[in-house]
Image: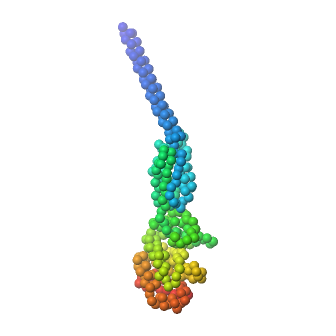
Amino acid sequence: MASSKAEILQASRERDRHKRQISRLLGCFIVVAIIGSFLLLVNLYFLRVTRVEIIGQTSADQLTVKQFVDSQLTGRHIGLIPKSSIFFVSKGILIKNITKRFPGLAKVTITWPDLNTLAITVTDRESKVLWCIDGKEDKKCYYLEPAGTAYQEAPNFSDSLYIELHSKLPLQKIGDKVIDPKALIRSTAFLNFVKSALSLWPTPNLRLLKVDVYSQKDFVAILIKPSDPAWQGRVLFNTDQSANTIITNYHSALKNDKFRTDWQAGGGRLDYLDLRFPGKVFYRFK
């Protein structure tokens, strides 16, 4: 009787072990089936990003931006999952990588016009100031952001849309801060006024050529007269004073009767107009 009981217990254990083995095999099969189905799904071609559109006017070449995005979507995660799978394209990460690669972009937005298309809208920083390094033969300019950082190389412009701040100090690398933000704000506010009020001068058709930066606070604006290549005048100013103070002194000087009389006597050949000293304006003719 005892022997029969032992045999029954042994048979019961065998059945339980067999059931557990079947359960394990079934569980493994289900896991493999799920993973296999998942991998099959994410590898389906019609569930991948196959087209990238770059929208918006930008100083960064659109083709270069597209090529960078394509590179971000090329390859596989852990050798199995395509980076272009619509399930694994992270808009947040992609936007972060694009703005890091192209710091001249102020805003990047991503939308999905259809299942396989990624539409990337880019907007440039509204920079109207260039930081230029004067070389022996040519100059190299960079877009300047309000924080005083040179963030992207700029082409040489033939017009006067941009204010050019010129320095002889080399730029170590893009992304470096080259000027104090307060000095930049004050100088550009004054220079924008100079550009918008060139008619204040006793002679017509003057143009702001460039601005030499001699220190973080001392600036020399160079005015020229395209119709008279020999004419060149300098406006010296210092950003220790507020932009409003500099503008007020500048405006008062140009409207001053004595300045206009001296202008006529000097044949309009201005050497410099010096606004660096609080409450005082100095000028000299050649």
In the image, residue 60 above or below residue 3: below
In this view of the protein, which residue sits in the foreground, 55 or 180?
Answer: 55
At horizontal 52% and vertical 69% (from top left) the residue drawn is: 130
At horizontal 57% and vertical 55% (from top left) the residue drawn is: 63
Tally the numbered discs.
0
Q: Quadrant of the C terminus?
A: bottom right
At horizontal 38% and vertical 9% (from top left) the residue drawn is: 4
Q: Is residue 233 left or right of residue 257?
A: right
- Picture coordinates of residue 82, whole percent (x, y): 53, 42
In this view of the protein, which residue sits in the foreground, 154 or 119?
Answer: 119
- Picture coordinates of residue 103, whole percent (x, y): 50, 59
In this view of the protein, which residue sits in the foreground, 122 or 69?
Answer: 122
Q: Quadrant of the N terminus?
A: top left
In the image, residue 239 above or below residue 257: above
In the image, residue 46 above or below residue 29: below
In this view of the protein, which residue sits in the foreground, 68 or 217?
Answer: 68
- Picture coordinates of residue 15, whole percent (x, y): 42, 18
- Picture coordinates of residue 240, whole percent (x, y): 43, 77
At horizontal 41% and vertical 79% (from top left) the residue drawn is: 245
Can I make out residue 77 in this image?
A: no
